[in-house]
Image: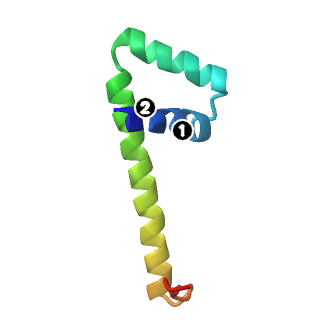
Amino acid sequence: REIELIMLVKHLLYTEKFTIDGARKRIEQFRRTGSLKNEARFALQSEAIEDLTKELRTIRDIVDGKTPIEDPGN
């Protein structure tokens, strides 16, 4: 639950470009309307999709020969 809330804050600040005060007010609005849980879950899922998309692009670039394979031992 806390992770979802943290991801919601991150989503509001970095993706939606809210100020800290604006994000705080938006979260309070979600609490009042009872939509905090759904919004927090959505933010967590959005971040997961974004991370997966980046990873898939990296894999595609490696397969296409655009990016060298990194040695995990370094």
74 over 27 or under it: above or below: below
Tell which residue pokes out farthest to the front in this image. 73
Task: Name the residue: 47% across, 13% down.
Answer: 29
Decide if residue 73 is on the left or right side of residue 37: right
Are dots 2 and 1 in contact, CB under 8 Å?
Answer: no
* 67 sits to left or right of 64: right
Q: Position of residue 22 (x, y in %)?
A: 62, 21
Packing grade of label 1 (10 A; few <14, some 14-19, many >=20) is: some
Q: Amino acid at mark 2?
A: Leu
**Can you identify the residue that label 2 sits on?**
5
Name the residue nearer the viewer: 1 or 41: 1
Q: Which residue type carries mark 1? A: Lys
Residue 30 in which image quadrant: top left
x%, y% of residue 38?
Answer: 32, 28
Q: Residue at x 38, y 29 (%)?
A: 39
**43 over 47 or under it: above or below:** above
Residue pointed to by mark 1: 10
Residues at marks 2 and 1, CA–CA distance in whole angstroms: 9 Å
Q: Position of residue 16 (x, y in %)?
A: 57, 35
> Counting residues from the N terminus, which is met first, the one under dot 2 or under dot 1?
2
> Which quadrant of the view contains residue 53?
bottom left
Q: Position of residue 10 (x, y in %)?
A: 54, 38
For residue 41, above or below residue 60: above
**What residue is drawn where x is 44% and y is 79%?**
60
Q: Residue at x 50, y 86 (%)?
A: 73
Assess disc 2: are there few (<14), some (14-19) or many (≥20) residues with their C-alpha within 10 Å of its C-alpha.
some
SS of the residue at dot 2?
helix
